[in-house]
Image (tube, rainbow, N blue to C red):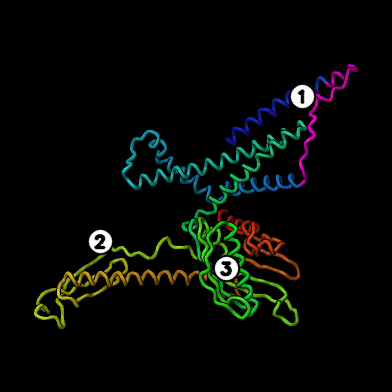
Amino acid sequence: MFYSKLKNIKYLIRKQHQQHIKHETLFKNSLNNNLYYNKNYFCTSTTTISDSSIQDIAYKEKEVKRIIDLLFSSQYHKNNLSIFKRYEEMKLPEMIESGIGIDTSNVDTINQIKNYNQTKQSINELESLSKEFKDYLEVVEMSKKIGDNDWLIESHSLIDQLFSNCCELEINALMNGMDDGKGCFIEIQAGAGGNDSMDWTKILFEMYCKWGARKGYNVEIIDITPGEYGYRRAALKIDGHNAFGWMRTEMGIHRLIRISPFSVNGKRHTSFASVVIYPIADDSIKINIDPKDLHIETLKSSGAGGQHVNTTESAVRIVHIPTGITVLSCGERSQHQNKSTGLSLLKSKLYSHELKKRMEAEKSFRDELGKNSWASDSVVRTYTMHPQERVKDQRTGSEVLQISKILDGEEELDNMIKKALSVELE
């Protein structure tokens, strides 16, 4: 629909441009022959474009170009091309078209076809967007050439759709991690800086709450440990599609520089807070034991148990081969009962094992942060309130001069996050 409208405008402008050339020739001839001057030979449109509209159009054109260039040069696009080439070498497109050699009952084959279609769609969307933008620029140039503001305004109306499509494509490319589509937990911990760091923790907590609400996510306060002038620790849950994808680059040390409201001398103070992001698990830990992973042996029981003790092999030892976890059950009178009890105990041990793995994973998150103080080399962003207002992302070098827009969780925060995510695409 969009491309059809673009082609139609292009055709009409070309037609008008040809008429314009014809009229201009007639006008010149009339002057040479001392005939009359007919101003209708030229476009008499009085429609003008406001300065604010021109600035908005220029910004959107610049962003569309930036996103297209970024995506074409990204590893994400290169990987898609590589995957698509591999499928072509496998003759998968021909097989899909003919239906020959496709086993629709095979799960792996179905997944291959699904992956192929998604990869092809991603490549085609980017190439189509690039072509549409080139045509748009051509239409704008043609409108300027014939000096018709009406056509120029009509051409510029297309940039809104291009900009929207481009932003959507960029988000899809940025949010391509395994857990990016999930919601997230955010944990903020006060670091070096005393009362200022606790106040800073509270400010960050409120920033993420405002950001989540603006994005339309469900924001839930999980835990707050109050300090004397703020929070020692705070945790919240932001639930919604791509919440973790947006927030994952926020993990690290956030540094604040300002005139301390707690300093009687009004001195400049630096404080720190660490931010840790966890994806929300799809469900609680589930333990599914595959019988193939078990080595079960029976042996004679010992101890109190009546006439069956030491006469029958009622005791059961179960070894979980992947983890090496072993349980022994011999308290029941029958082998069947001991096996059931042993499997229950094994499930509990495997649950504890998974829980420990999660705790270690969380610890590794924290280890990546380094020290929550001056010695940290994991500062992701510096927020300066004095001597001038500025927020600087230490990873991308991008800066925003209006700190209030960042702390209020406005679109400027989105832009800083997108730049940090874009680094991963390059």
Q: Range of the magenta residues?
A: 27-51
Question: Label 2 amino acid?
Answer: Lys
- Measure the alpha-carbon separation of dots 1 and 2: 82 Å
Question: Label 1 amino acid?
Answer: Ile
Q: Main secondary structure of the magenta part?
A: loop
Label 2 crowding class (10 Å Cα cut-off): few <14, some 14-19, many 20+?
Answer: few
Front residue of this view, candidates 277 and 29: 277
- Measure the alpha-carbon separation of dots 3 and 1: 62 Å
- The residue carrying mark 2 is 292
Q: Earlier in the sequence, mark 2 or mark 3?
A: 3
Q: Earlier in the sequence, mark 1 or mark 2?
A: 1
Left or right of residue 395, residue 140 in this image: right
When asked about the image quadrant of residue 207, the answer is bottom right
Q: Secondary structure at mark 1?
A: helix
Left or right of residue 296, residue 152 in this image: right
Q: Is residue 49 within the magenta segment?
A: yes
- The residue carrying mark 1 is 21
- The residue carrying mark 3 is 252
Residue 394, compared with residue 266, is above or below; it is: above
When asked about the image quadrant of residue 288, the answer is bottom left
Looking at the picture, how far across and down is residue 352, in whole percent? Answer: 36, 72
Question: Label 3 amino acid?
Answer: Gly
Front residue of this view, candidates 425 and 149: 149
The quadrant of the image that shows the N terminus is top right
Residue drawn at (47%, 70%) of the image: 362
Label 3 crowding class (10 Å Cα cut-off): few <14, some 14-19, many 20+?
Answer: many
Label 1 crowding class (10 Å Cα cut-off): few <14, some 14-19, many 20+?
Answer: some
